[in-house]
Amino acid sequence: MRKKQLKQIRALTFGEALFDIIKGSAHLGGAPLNLAAHLAKLGAKPAVLTAVGKDKLGEVLLARAEEMGVDTSYIVIDEHRPTGTVTVELKNEGIPVFSINEGVAWDAITPDERKFEALAREDWDVFCFGTLAQRSEENRKTLKRLLSEIKAKHFFYDVNLRARFYRKEWISFSLEHCTILKMNEEEAAAISSMLFGTVHTCRTICRLLTDKYPKISLICITKGPEGAAVYHKGVYEEVGTTPIEVADTVGAGDAFSAGFLYTYLSGYGVSKAASIASILGTYVASKPGAVPEYSGELMKKLEMG
């Protein structure tokens, strides 16, 4: 792809890395790992900060992540907890329902001082985090320290709500510390109700959130087959998408995030970034698994001249 940026984009993602069990097959997953994998495919240089068990699944996860071009040097090996797994049941239109196991390795992402110091030395273009990994106290402590110590141009928060694994205080903390916010339409409604007492339109939610949390400069809201919306400097814009036959939507949001961040951090405008993000997210929804191979046709569509 033709790109504006002269240096390789450096991204750090924090949180869950696991295996999604879909129709009996194991697929590498977890939003932070999916995001890193798609960023690598696009040409960025991503690293993931997570934890895996000292087991066969952990070995496979590390090897697969490295094969995909993801820096695994910050991953913690947990001697006591197993590598995370999630059972995914696909409902109508490929919408996933997750059964997320607890007490797994990524519930204790606790880097040693050497890793913290290495992370703090880097100049990151973006640090990416979500809500699910904040379900454990250990991870909340790690995230708080990361947000105070690492150097990044942008802090990207993907709301990514999962049943019963979120609290208002975690979401408020995350909104206070992010510069780019991404959520889907249902999550936007949930946050509107949680923070403002009623469900507002997406346009109004964007305005209210940027008023309440001044660090937020940009908001993306994905809307499934209806495309997406972006809000930047008071301007709300909707971006359409091409109708497809959905295989499953696992990882489609992470692909959208990767497409948006890569394009935006490469120096393109918000509209272009949202358009590229929608193309990539739609493509992933049309294929099984969270990180399918990119076709030649897709690569042509993603070219940014």
Image (cartoon, rainbow, N blue to C red):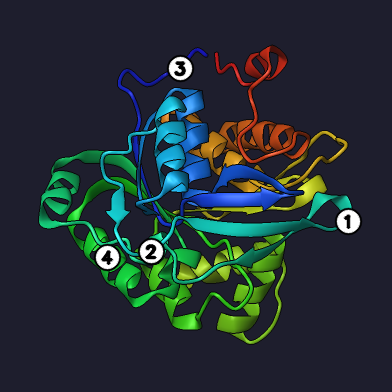
Relative placement, left or right, of 47 versus 284 is left
Tag 3 residue: 3
Say few, some or many: other residues with alpha carbon within 10 Å of mark 4 (under 14 / 14 to 19 / 20 or more): some
Percent position of residue 186, x then y = 71, 66
Amino acid beneath label 2? Arg
Q: Earlier in the sequence, mark 4 or mark 3?
A: 3
Percent position of residue 1, x then y = 52, 14
Amino acid beneath label 3? Lys
Tag 4 residue: 142
Tag 2 residue: 81
Say few, some or many: other residues with alpha carbon within 10 Å of mark 2 (under 14 / 14 to 19 / 20 or more): some
Whether the residues at callouts 1 and 4 have beta carbons within 8 Å, the answer is no
Task: Return the residue nearer the eye: 141 or 109.
Answer: 109
Tag 1 residue: 92
Could you tell me which residue is drawn at 50 percent across and 66 percent down?
132
Amino acid beneath label 4? Thr
The answer to whether 177 is drawn above or below residue 191 in the figure is above
Q: Earlier in the sequence, mark 1 or mark 2?
A: 2
Q: Earlier in the sequence, mark 4 or mark 2?
A: 2
User: What distance separates the C-alpha of mark 4 from that of mark 3?
Assistant: 34 Å
Q: Earlier in the sequence, mark 1 or mark 3?
A: 3
Q: Earlier in the sequence, mark 1 or mark 4?
A: 1
Task: Return the residue nearer the eye: 63 or 291.
Answer: 63
User: What distance separates the C-alpha of mark 1 from that of mark 2?
Assistant: 34 Å
